[in-house]
């Protein structure tokens, strides 16, 4: 019987080529989208699962509170003393390991590169995390000071085919390190990706940290700290003991301004959104979103099949009637139709796999991931895929199978089935459902595009165009004034400045702020972010002054006592008019001085965050150099900068980037989302229109004699087109009305992620509605016009 079912199924697919083609293409597109998004979601959910102890590794985070109890800073890093003291005070913790991310100039022979992702790591790193160490002893490789391990690609880059073990490399043209091991790079689905590992004990001799600083410095929260807990241990027990732990080791009131927490390693990528992270994370909301889109698009494809298969039922009504007359049971007929459905889905699945193979490189380009088809070879996934195929086939074919076989032979002969098909309420509901989904995606795409355009045109309060960024050398004796003058010898360079941070990064540093109250300086409850700059920073970025003046080299006290606030800081500190702040005494950290100016607000960080209160001063580590170039020859200006840089820093590679490129990366996730929304909205509309095309073909065929009679009685072609299109157009309009409030609610919530965002214009809904209706009309009209132009004699001659 099974062979007979398959044989008849093939015959029916070949007999009705147009409907078979529409069905197969629709289902294949739906399955392809589902598979692509499933690969993406599976990748997002697999982060850090390569670690053998993934479920027992927890990251220590630190949140700072303002004096009013509100959160002022949320860090995925902590101070260096926490690690050893947690291990000392809580013996139930099996391991505590720390890492410090940095960059360095690495030299070996003629090889000289400015390298990132260099981590100083505790010697027990490999007892916590799973690394594939291919050379060296993981138990000893990071024990001794000035030891360094290379990832395999870095080892090949520097040493080629040489054995790297025992070789000596120099970092920052100052210190020599011995290579003690080589490891395979961590997979793409890891929280961090070190290119190099150096022994944490090396920091004991570091001029910035030092052994004493590592034991007592509670303010330098730059260290990633991970705990390995016992199996089945509840981390909440440890978290509840942290307040007393801080009060005991930092100061008796530490828990009132500092909160320690733990997060499971495998949760970090999708659930952690701290102000500082080891790398950019994903978002569980996007996983939910793309999972929903995958299901919805597959649902649209299934709806198409259900509609078209049901519509084609009229053509097979006599076949069903005759089968029943000669003794076929309903269960046999159901199996016949379900076998046809499953066969069609299997063919569609093969086509879908080809589509996935072709599209995966493009998805990788959009998402900046390294997704592969190996995900589809996972035994669990294969079982899931087979289940989805069977489920899709059963769901898509169940309604037509049970619907068609429910009719009695006498009903078929009396024409009741045709009447039922004409007035199919379920079919109408399904059309509304699939177009509602498509319209939601169209509106979402339009809102995301509108927000991206809003960001691009938003006035940031500074100039980000044609600014070249360089990382300065750390030697404080370097004469940057001379370098600046030498750079400005090129007519294409207008300004050169230095700063501790640059626009597009988070302002994480802050100290206590003090203002005059009565006759003395008093601490405020306000967290003000710090920014160390030179006098050329404000002119370089064209930041406007609201009151007072910029730093000046003509006033030596500006360098030691001068402060410039932004407008938000001045307002929060109590000065309604920026002019009122100028000239007042001000303290920040250990420095006391005077406010010499107030700037207009500028969006130093992403538009996801509100403008924070900021104070500028001229002391501190200014490692960034910003070079403003004119609109002339950019290549000539860069060549001049390179020449000056290499002459001043012969041992430092010349590496630069443009600020506007960094700014664009702030919204890479949203831009990817916009693109994917647009693609899947287009696919949803395409699949929906395939269904409309098939249904319009069927309805025109079902009403062919009615059309012939109307034409004989004088009906015009245009009136017949309207007649045939009206029913479908009404369904599309209902879908637009249903989809609009759903899309508005979802995108309104999405926009709340931005501190500064556009409003959702009514024109977006009108445009989406007009676009959907226009596409539907074009789809339907093609077949309607064809039916209306048909010679009535051909349709009536059988009468």
Image (cartoon, rainbow, N blue to C red):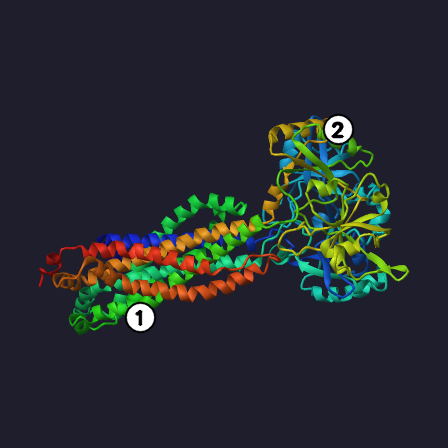
**Residue displayed at 38% across by 56% down:** 771
Q: Quadrant of residue 337?
A: bottom left
Q: Is residue 44 left or right of residue 193?
A: left
Residue 176 in view? yes
Q: Which residue is mark 1?
A: 425
- Earlier-in-chain disc, 2 versus 1: 1
Q: Residues within 10 Å of mark 1 (few under 14, many from 20)?
A: few
Residue 566's place in the image compared with 741, above or below, is above
Where disc 2 sits, the SS reads helix
Q: Residues within 10 Å of mark 2 (few under 14, many from 20)?
A: some
**Residue displayed at 89% across by 62% down:** 518
**Residue displayed at 18% across by 59% down:** 716
Query: Which callout, 2 or 1, points to the residue nearer the camera?
Result: 2
Q: Is residue 350 left or right of residue 561?
A: left
In the rendering, at what x and y percent does residue 196 appear?
69, 40
Q: Is residue 742 left or right of residue 758?
A: left
Residue 187 in view? no
Image quarter where the N terminus lies is: bottom left
Which residue occupies the foreground of this view, 325 or 39? 39
In the rendering, at what x and y percent does residue 56 appear?
67, 58
Q: Which residue is mark 2?
A: 648
Contact (CB < 8 A) between labels 2 and 1? no
In the rendering, at what x and y percent does residue 272 appear?
64, 57
């Amino acid at each position: 019987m099974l062979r007979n079912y398959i044989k008849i199924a093939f015959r029916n697919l070949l007999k009705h080529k147009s409907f078979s083609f529409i069905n197969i293409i629709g289902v294949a597109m739906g399955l392809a989208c589902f598979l692509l998004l499933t690969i993406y979601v599976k990748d997002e959910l697999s982060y850090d699962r390569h670690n053998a102890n993934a479920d027992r590794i927890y990251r220590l985070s630190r949140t700072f509170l303002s004096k009013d109890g509100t959160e002022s800073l949320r860090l995925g890093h902590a101070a260096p003393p926490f690690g050893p003291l947690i291990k000392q005070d809580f013996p139930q913790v099996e391991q505590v390991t720390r890492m410090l991310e940095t960059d360095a100039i690495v030299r070996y022979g003629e090889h000289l590169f400015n390298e990132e992702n260099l981590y100083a790591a505790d010697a027990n790193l490999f007892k916590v995390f799973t690394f594939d160490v291919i050379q060296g002893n993981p138990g000893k490789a990071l024990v001794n000071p000035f030891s360094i391990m290379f990832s395999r690609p870095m080892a090949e880059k520097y040493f080629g085919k040489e054995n790297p073990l025992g070789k000596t490399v120099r970092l920052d043209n100052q210190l020599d390190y011995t290579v003690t091991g080589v490891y395979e790079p961590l997979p793409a689905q890891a929280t961090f990706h070190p290119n190099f590992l150096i022994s944490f004990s090396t920091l004991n001799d570091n001029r910035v940290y030092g052994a004493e600083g590592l034991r007592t410095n509670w303010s330098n929260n730059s260290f990633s700290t991970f705990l390995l807990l016992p199996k089945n241990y509840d981390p909440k027990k440890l978290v509840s003991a942290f307040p007393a732990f801080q009060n005991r080791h930092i100061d008796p009131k530490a828990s009132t301004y500092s909160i320690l927490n733990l997060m499971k390693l495998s949760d970090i990528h999708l659930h952690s959104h701290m102000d500082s992270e080891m790398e950019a994370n994903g978002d569980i909301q996007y996983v939910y979103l793309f999972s929903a889109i995958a299901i919805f698009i597959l649902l649209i494809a299934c709806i198409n099949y259900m509609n078209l298969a049901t519509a084609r039922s009229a053509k097979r009504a006599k076949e069903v009637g005759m089968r029943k007359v000669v003794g076929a049971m309903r269960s046999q007929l159901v199996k016949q139709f379900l076998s046809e459905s499953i066969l069609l889905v299997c063919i569609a699945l093969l086509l879908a796999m080809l589509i996935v193979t072709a599209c995966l490189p493009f998805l990788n380009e959009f998402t900046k991931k390294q997704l592969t088809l190996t995900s589809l070879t996972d035994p669990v996934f294969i079982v899931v895929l087979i289940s989805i195929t069977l489920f899709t086939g059963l769901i898509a074919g169940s309604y037509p199978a049970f619907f068609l076989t429910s009719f009695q032979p006498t009903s078929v002969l009396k024409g009741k089935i045709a009447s039922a098909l004409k007035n199919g309420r379920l079919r109408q509901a399904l059309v509304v459902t699939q177009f509602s989904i498509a319209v939601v995606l169209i509106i979402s795409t339009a809102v995301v595009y509108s927000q991206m355009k809003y960001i691009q045109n938003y006035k940031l309060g500074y100039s980000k165009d044609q600014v070249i960024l360089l990382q300065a050398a750390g030697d404080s004796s370097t004469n940057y004034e001379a370098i600046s003058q030498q750079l400005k010898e090129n007519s294409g360079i207008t300004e050169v400045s230095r700063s501790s941070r640059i626009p597009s990064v988070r302002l994480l540093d802050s100290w206590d702020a003090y203002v005059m109250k009565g006759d003395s300086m008093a601490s405020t409850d306000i967290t003000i972010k710090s920014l160390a700059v030179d006098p050329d920073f404000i002119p370089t970025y064209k930041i406007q002054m609201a009151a007072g003046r910029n730093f000046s080299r003509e006033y030596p006290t500006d360098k030691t006592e001068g402060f410039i606030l932004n407008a938000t800081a001045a307002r929060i500190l109590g000065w309604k008019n920026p002019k009122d702040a100028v000239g007042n005494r001000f303290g920040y950290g250990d420095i006391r001085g005077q406010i010499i100016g107030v700037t207009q607000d500028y969006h130093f960080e992403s538009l996801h965050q509100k403008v924070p209160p900021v104070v500028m001063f001229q002391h501190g580590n200014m490692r960034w150099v910003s070079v403003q170039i004119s609109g002339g020859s950019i290549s000539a200006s860069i060549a001049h900068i390179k020449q000056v840089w290499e002459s001043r820093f012969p041992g430092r590679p010349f590496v630069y980037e443009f600020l506007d490129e960094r700014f664009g990366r702030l919204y890479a996730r949203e831009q990817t989302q916009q693109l994917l929304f647009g693609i899947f909205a287009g696919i949803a509309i395409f699949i929906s229109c395939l269904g409309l095309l098939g249904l319009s073909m069927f309805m025109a065929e079902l009403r062919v004699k009615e059309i012939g009679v109307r034409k004989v009685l004088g009906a015009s072609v245009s009136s017949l087109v309207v007649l045939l299109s009206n029913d479908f157009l009404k369904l599309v309009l209902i879908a637009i009305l249903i989809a609009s409030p759903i899309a508005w609610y979802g995108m309104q919530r999405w926009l709340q992620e931005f501190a500064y965002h556009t409003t959702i214009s009514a024109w977006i809904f009108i445009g989406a509605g007009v676009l959907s209706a226009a596409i539907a009309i074009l789809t339907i009209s093609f077949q309607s016009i064809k039916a209306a132009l048909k010679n009535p004699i051909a349709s009536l001659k059988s009468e």
